[in-house]
Image (cartoon, helix red, strand yellow):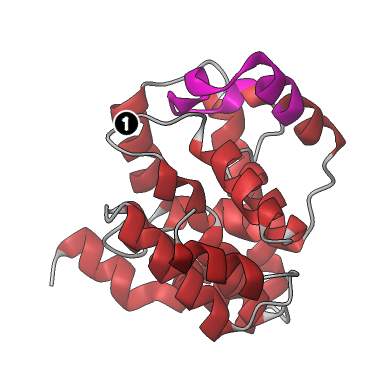
């Protein structure tokens, strides 16, 4: 552990991170692996904050959860890692004393609560014990508004900005293939959108109308 990271470990204790603290730690993580995952996280954070503001949720909490949901990629380079980015992220945030954020690092990839619904390939880097832990974690998890929000926003946001769910789903399918539980995962994601549509009292796409129109039709 280098001096900079050691200082961050001392500072970032507890889930009550300020936005400034969260952004400082996130900036450090991006320095370790400056790739498109960082822009994706920023856009997820923006989408989560926007929806939270309009649905009576804690906007800062939603923003921080979105910013950190893929934090495990700081140690997952060139398609390789000592474990899955979701598990690396979980361990990383647990070390910082942030169990709620750590939980988001795991649950964001599973709108459908089954480890076999994971679309990426990096679970192959997990040990048998890690896979058992993730499986048990998902079985025991009771998703709240924030779990569902980050799951939704993870599918609303690319590295370029906010888009229609179908575009993001197709992008993932083209990169990773269509898995057996893909339809169940897609349905769970659309169910999450319906959940927040009802909380908002309208279609949440309206909150991102300009971005979505630009993405579909071009600027």
Q: SS at mark 1? A: loop
Taking depth in this image into account, of 53 and 187 the one nearest to the observer is: 53
In-front residue for pair 47/66: 66
On the rendered structure, is 217 left or right of 212? left
Count of labels shown? 1
Q: Which contiguous range is marked in magenta? A: 116-134
Going 54% across and 37% down the picture, which residue do you hit?
186
Quarter of the image with the C terminus in it: bottom left
Mark 1 sits on what residue? Answer: 79
Residue 57, placed above or below residue 218:
below
Q: Position of residue 108 (x, y in %)?
A: 60, 47
Q: In the image shown, does 146 or 180 lie closer to the viewer?
A: 146
The residue at 74%/61% (across/down) is 97
Q: Is residue 128 magenta?
A: yes
Magenta region, mostly helix, strand or loop?
helix
Task: Tell me if 69 is positioned left or right of 194 in this view.
Answer: left
């Amino acid at each position: 552990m280098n001096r900079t990271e050691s200082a961050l470990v001392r500072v970032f204790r507890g889930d009550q991170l300020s936005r400034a603290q969260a952004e400082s730690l996130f900036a450090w993580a991006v320095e370790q692996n400056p790739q498109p995952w960082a822009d994706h996280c920023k856009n997820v954070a923006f989408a989560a904050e926007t929806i939270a503001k309009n649905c009576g949720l804690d906007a800062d909490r939603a923003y921080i959860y979105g910013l950190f949901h893929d934090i495990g990629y700081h140690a997952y380079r060139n398609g390789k890692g000592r474990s899955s980015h979701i598990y690396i992220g979980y361990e990383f945030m647990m070390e910082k004393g942030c169990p709620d954020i750590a939980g988001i690092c795991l649950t964001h990839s599973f709108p459908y609560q089954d480890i076999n619904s994971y679309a990426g390939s990096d679970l192959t880097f997990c040990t048998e014990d890690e896979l058992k832990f993730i499986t048990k974690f998902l079985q025991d998890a009771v998703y709240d508004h924030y779990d569902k929000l980050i799951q939704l926003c993870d599918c609303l946001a690319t590295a370029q900005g906010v888009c229609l769910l179908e575009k993001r789903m197709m992008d993932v399918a083209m990169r990773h293939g269509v898995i057996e539980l893909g339809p169940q995962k897609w349905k769970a994601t659309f169910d999450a959108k319906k959940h927040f549509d009802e909380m908002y009292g309208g279609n949440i796409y309206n909150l991102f109308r300009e971005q979505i129109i630009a993405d579909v039709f071009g600027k």
